[in-house]
Amino acid sequence: MLFTGNNYQQSSTATVRAGLGSGNGLWTYTTTDMTSSPWDGSYFTDGGALGMRPGDVVMIKSHGTTVQSSWYLRFAVVGYVTTAGVAYLSTNSLITCTT
């Protein structure tokens, strides 16, 4: 079993337990936030409680609040989850679409 960066509800970042290795989930999130904020560690503060695990893929669709003809589609991978449950995402890939 692979143990990687899932420290949710652990006493320290060095603690590992069986079953907390890499994930294989797909998450989707829709927002009007057109910035890079979803890749900031303070954005998905409840990732651990939701069940996010390192290796999970996150697909984020976003559009502006006033011009909904411009869409962003971003993909990221959960890199690690902190002891408090904050999910940190990888550098995003970005696909844009304007109609």
Image (tube, rainbow, N blue to C red):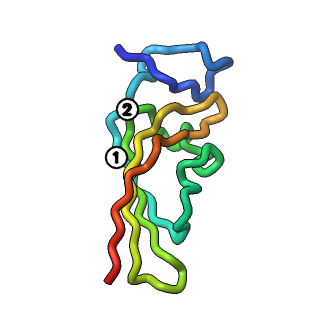
The residue depicted at 39 percent of the width and 27 percent of the height is 22
- Residue 4 relative to residue 38: left or right: left
Residue, disc 2: 23
Residue, disc 1: 26
Residue type at numbered disc 2: Gly
Q: Decide: marks 1, 2 in contact (CB < 8 A)?
A: no
Q: How many numbered discs sit on the rendered protein?
A: 2
Considering depth in this image, is 88 or 1 the residue closer to the camera? 88
Considering depth in this image, is 93 or 24 the residue closer to the camera? 93
Are there few (<14), some (14-19), or many (20+) residues within 10 Å of tag 2? some
The residue depicted at 40 percent of the width and 67 percent of the height is 72
Residue type at numbered disc 1: Leu
The residue depicted at 42 percent of the width and 22 percent of the height is 21
Are there few (<14), some (14-19), or many (20+) residues within 10 Å of tag 1? few
Q: Give the CA separation, mark 1 to mark 2.
A: 9 Å
Q: Residue 76: horizontal and vertical position, in percent?
A: 41, 46
- Residue 14 relative to residue 55: left or right: right
Element at badge 1?
Answer: strand
Q: Residue 56: horizontal and vertical position, in percent?
A: 38, 39
Query: Is residue 88 depicted above or below 11 in this figure?
Result: below
- Residue 22 relative to residue 64: left or right: left
Residue 71, quarter of picture: bottom left
Query: Is residue 52 depicted above or below 31 in this figure?
Result: above
Query: Is residue 38 depicted above or below 50 in this figure?
Result: below
Where, quadrant-wise, is the C terminus in this rendering? bottom left
Query: Is residue 42 depicted above or below 70 in this figure?
Result: above
Where, quadrant-wise, is the N terminus in this rendering? top left
The residue depicted at 36 percent of the width and 68 percent of the height is 96
Q: Residue 24: horizontal and vertical position, in percent?
A: 32, 35
Element at badge 2?
Answer: loop
Q: Residue 52: horizontal and vertical position, in percent?
A: 47, 39
